[in-house]
Image: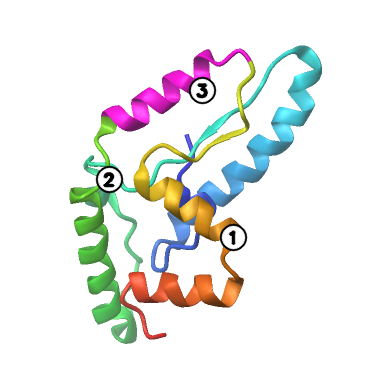
């Protein structure tokens, strides 16, 4: 189980996002290694999902004053995103689809509307425009 954060930066969520980036790379490599034995590795990359995810956000060991207000804003943004996110059943259906596919794809980024849109934007929009959009969406200075 990955996350759209494995493909797209999530400011102030570095620990979580970096583990998902690592999972993406590891899974892609493992898929190539295991395919010889008839085993496939598939990633499901959901976006915001209505769960208790935001209750378990990683906090810094020691808070730094210059980050306090923007971190608080990002936490509000995360809570709002989760509240408006996809139903867990959307992600579950994608997991079942990936697990039962005769020829599974490596990535199932379409585990919800937001994940599909973000995946398409990341691939097609120029980097500078994508970065501006990401910063605007996250209420960060452009």
Q: CA distance from mark 3 to mark 1?
A: 24 Å
Is residue 120 or residue 12 the one in the foreground? 120
Query: Which disc is residue 98 wearing?
Result: 3
Looking at marks 3 and 1 on the same chain, the residue that comes earlier in the sequence is marked by 3
Looking at the image, which residue is at 29% across and 42% down?
A: 49
Dot 1 falls on a residue whose secondary structure is helix
> Between tags 3 and 2, which lies in front?
3
> Between tags 3 and 1, which lies in front?
1
Name the quadrant containing residue 40: top right
Q: CA distance from mark 2 to mark 1?
A: 29 Å
> Does the stretch in magenta take in 57?
no
Mark 1, Cα crowd under 10 Å, few <14 / some 14-19 / many 20+, is: few
Query: Which disc is residue 53 wearing?
Result: 2
Looking at the image, which residue is at 51% across and 51% down?
A: 119
Q: Which residues are magenta?
A: 89-102
Q: Position of residue 35 (x, y in %)?
A: 76, 21
Position of 88 with respect to 127 (left or right) is: left
Mark 2, Cα crowd under 10 Å, few <14 / some 14-19 / many 20+, is: few
Q: Which residue is mark 1?
A: 124
Mark 3, Cα crowd under 10 Å, few <14 / some 14-19 / many 20+, is: many
Magenta stretch secondary structure, dominant:
helix
Q: CA distance from mark 3 to mark 2?
A: 22 Å
Looking at the image, which residue is at 29% across and 85% down?
A: 65
Is residue 97 or residue 7 the one in the foreground? 97
């Amino acid at each position: 189980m990955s996350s759209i954060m494995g493909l797209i930066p999530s400011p102030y969520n570095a620990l979580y996002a970096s583990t998902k980036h690592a999972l993406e790379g590891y899974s892609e490599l493992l898929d190539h290694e295991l395919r010889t034995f008839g085993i496939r590795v598939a990633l499901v990359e959901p976006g915001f999902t209505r769960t208790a995810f935001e209750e378990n956000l990683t906090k810094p060991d020691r808070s730094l004053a210059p980050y306090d207000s923007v971190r608080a804003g990002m936490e509000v943004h995360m809570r709002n995103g989760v509240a408006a996110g996809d139903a867990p059943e959307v992600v579950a259906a994608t997991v079942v689809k990936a697990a039962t596919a005769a020829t599974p794809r490596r990535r199932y980024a379409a585990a919800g509307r937001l994940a599909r849109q973000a995946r398409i934007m990341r691939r097609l929009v120029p980097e500078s425009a994508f970065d501006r959009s990401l910063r605007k969406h996250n209420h960060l200075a452009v």
